[in-house]
Image (cartoon, coloured by chain):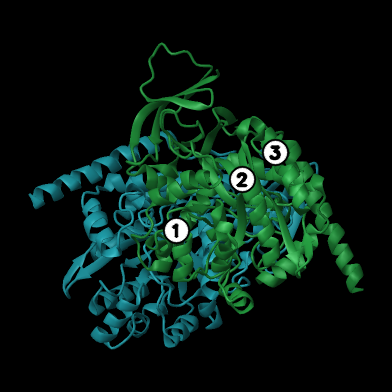
Chain colours: A cyan, B green
Amino acid sequence: MATIWIKHADVITLNEHGTLLHDADILIEGTRIKTIGTVPPDTQADEIINAAGYVALPGFFNAHCHAPMTFERGWAEDLPFPRWLNEKIWVAESALTPDDVYWGAALAACEMIRSGTVGFNDHYFHMNRVAEVVEQSGLKAMLAWCTFGIGDDKEIGPGADAQIAFSREWQNAAEGRIHTCLGPHSPYVCPPEFLKKIVELAGQYDMAIHLHVAESSEQVENSQQRHGQTPVEQLNTLGVFEHRTIAAHSLALTPTDCAILAEKGVFITRTPITYMKLAMPIRTLISELRAAGITRIALGSDGPASNADMDMLAVVRQTVLLEKYLRVDPEALPGDTALRMATQTGAQALGFNESGVLAEGRTADLILVNFNQPHLRPRHDLVANLVHSAKGADVTHVISDGKLLMRDRILLTLDEKRILDEAERRAFRMVNQNMNQVREYQA
Amino acid sequence: MATIWIKHADVITLNEHGTLLHDADILIEGTRIKTIGTVPPDTQADEIINAAGYVALPGFFNAHCHAPMTFERGWAEDLPFPRWLNEKIWVAESALTPDDVYWGAALAACEMIRSGTVGFNDHYFHMNRVAEVVEQSGLKAMLAWCTFGIGDDKEIGPGADAQIAFSREWQNAAEGRIHTCLGPHSPYVCPPEFLKKIVELAGQYDMAIHLHVAESSEQVENSQQRHGQTPVEQLNTLGVFEHRTIAAHSLALTPTDCAILAEKGVFITRTPITYMKLAMPIRTLISELRAAGITRIALGSDGPASNADMDMLAVVRQTVLLEKYLRVDPEALPGDTALRMATQTGAQALGFNESGVLAEGRTADLILVNFNQPHLRPRHDLVANLVHSAKGADVTHVISDGKLLMRDRILLTLDEKRILDEAERRAFRMVNQNMNQVREYQA
């Protein structure tokens, strides 16, 4: 088995005691952490990393994103949500080919590895092409092929058979690094009969469900008018929460909703930068979720069309800053809590339960951050410096399943230069092609 | 005169038309930009920079900070403001020596250059030692030696004579890169008689004034009770605004306050990350300032004890995100506007009126950002990618007064390794010394 010996690192373990280690060694054997602390000096290793002045911590899990939307980064700026979606995003996406999805996800994979992410929870189209990127990159992922309905009968997406075929082909592929789940878009574009079918499939094939929930008060009111229930109540009634569910956003919740989500152990993913950029009010703060007993709160970047980057350190910082500001309480949401949300809770949401903690026997999903830089000194508080001053670019090494994906800022599994050029060329083609169509239509 | 020829850059000029140039050359001669666009091929230059895929833009001006507070980065986390100040910050600062101030500012200078800042507006103690750092680093700065009063007679700080002596020694020093101004802390710790003396000195020596204004509703109410006027009204009555004034924060303003600030052309500096981290409500949003006719709004990082970094790209992004979110308007504050606040308006606040725009004849204060990276592709919108995806670490070259301060991420004017070690050693000593004193006092 391949071995990596990391020497002299400061370690943020994120274990239950919040243990920090100074000048410690980490020995990785195969896909697991064998030793943390002192490694016997006569140990042989295939790779030795001198990490003096570097901080080791669990790799990030991005628990809600649409990776191929890198193609639309910067494509729809400073617009209200309906115009953002209808005039720009959907217009561009309608010209997307399966190959485009591959290259968009590859661009996202480069960006994610460069900023310390080891796993992502993706929700998009042509997911077999995203799966190829996961396989090649060495990342981990849970992949949902987005489906939705128009009216009561028209179903958009691959259909149940194709979804199950995708899942059977890719579930636990890439040495177990790929998980698949069902991806109904949301209760507001999936009629009840449609969601019932999803629940049946989830039961039959033991699959998790990843969807968008309660993104606005308006959605909640519409649901109450149409179904006599909030979105959360409706999903509960339909049986969705009997399966592992990742409810992205969940911004507008009633106390009853919170009680349901707590009782059912539903994962909520918050993507704060999207809420700020698109001006989507957070009606139920993280502190309120926690007070209601909801412990499974993960973090994500959302798609690069709305964020516009996939840097989980930016997400972590924004999560604590926004919570403190909106609660008017500087003690709200300490950095350590947010780091756990972005690592171990995300890992659990994606079904990678051995990740997210640095401990002997755990999966070797970890990153190194170079603290030998002016903005990360002095080191009074490693966690505070990491949360409030570190950036994605400070990550130097990324290890997933004991395998190096980046060494000293060099990507090892992907042809980055080719991806940058090919993805950009295709993104330019995509938007030009469609804007020409729009112009023809309008003429 | 030394010349630098930058080739093949995309250029965000920030001129009045918002001109963007693709694959353009920039020729710098001495301290000025000689040519932008096409440089004759037979031109000789001392340095040629191949900037293909890089974006050139004006360097940032950090319009409110306390640079030596790098020593307290991560030293006072997740605390309410009074405990943050009284139990941690003032305790640590009471052990600060003039040499500590030098090393703290040197650490900040490394961080600022690395993230694309060319000028900063500093407000602290022992400012002659900060001036030394400015001289050595090649940065620009406006320096205020902070003074304040306790009760009506006790004055803390260097006293009028020493302030004027400092100013006479350093005003326009370092080839004009150092400006000095007066630094009364704020109306809430400077009694009226004290402020009147400041106004007299400002008139006598033609000096600008940099102070903290209206940081909270509580301060405004206290001022109204004590003086029968808001802080802004009081400062106006005392004649402060007859001189160029930088009013940091100005978070809680009445319509009358806004009218005064607009009429008098007062510069306001906003530091949004501090407001979020310390949970300080922004009662008057930037959109409201602009609607009231206040055009001189600059941006700053504040001190690293409250932010905790000095990355102006992080400040720019946070400014637009927070404004959109709090206004519930995704169209609020486009990226281009925020970039101008962080460059040209900041430069004007500090008295460097030829900076902040890339145009022929202007001062060569500019930076290059490497867009050959996955998080900055595709390049549908250079400004959007810069504001929402770029980080300080993406800045590769920094030029101030036509002189390279950083080339390909290597600092050219400062001994970075020595500064990192010496600053950290002193910061650890400072907090340990004082915490021991606190323990002795409590025992």
Q: Is residue A406 above or below residue B306?
A: above
The residue located at (74%, 43%) in the rendering is: B166
Q: Where is residue A349? Give x, y as percent.
A: 48, 67
The residue located at (62%, 52%) in the rendering is: B65
The residue located at (25%, 54%) in the rendering is: A88
Q: B359 left or right of A98?
A: right
Quickly name the residue at label 2: B206
Q: Are marks 1 and 2 on the same chain?
A: yes
Q: Where is residue B185? Give x, y as percent.
A: 67, 60
Alpha carbon separation for disc pair 1 and 3: 31 Å
Q: Is residue B356 above or below residue B262?
A: above
Name the mark nearer the viewer: 2 or 3. 2
SS class of the residue under badge 1?
A: helix
Q: Nearer the viewer, residue A422 or B7?
A: B7
Name the mark nearer the viewer: 1 or 3. 1
SS class of the residue under badge 3?
A: helix
Q: A91 left or right of B425?
A: left
- The three-letter amino acid code for the residue at tag 3 is Trp
Which of the two labelled residues, at mark 1 and mark 2, occupies the earlier sequence position?
Answer: 2
- The three-letter amino acid code for the residue at tag 2 is Asp
Label 3 marks a residue whose chain is B
Alpha carbon separation for disc pair 1 and 2: 20 Å
| Residue A353 visible (yes or no) | no
Q: Is residue B410 above or below residue B145?
A: above
The residue located at (51%, 64%) in the rendering is: A346
Residue B328, image quadrant: bottom left
Residue B263's tag is 1
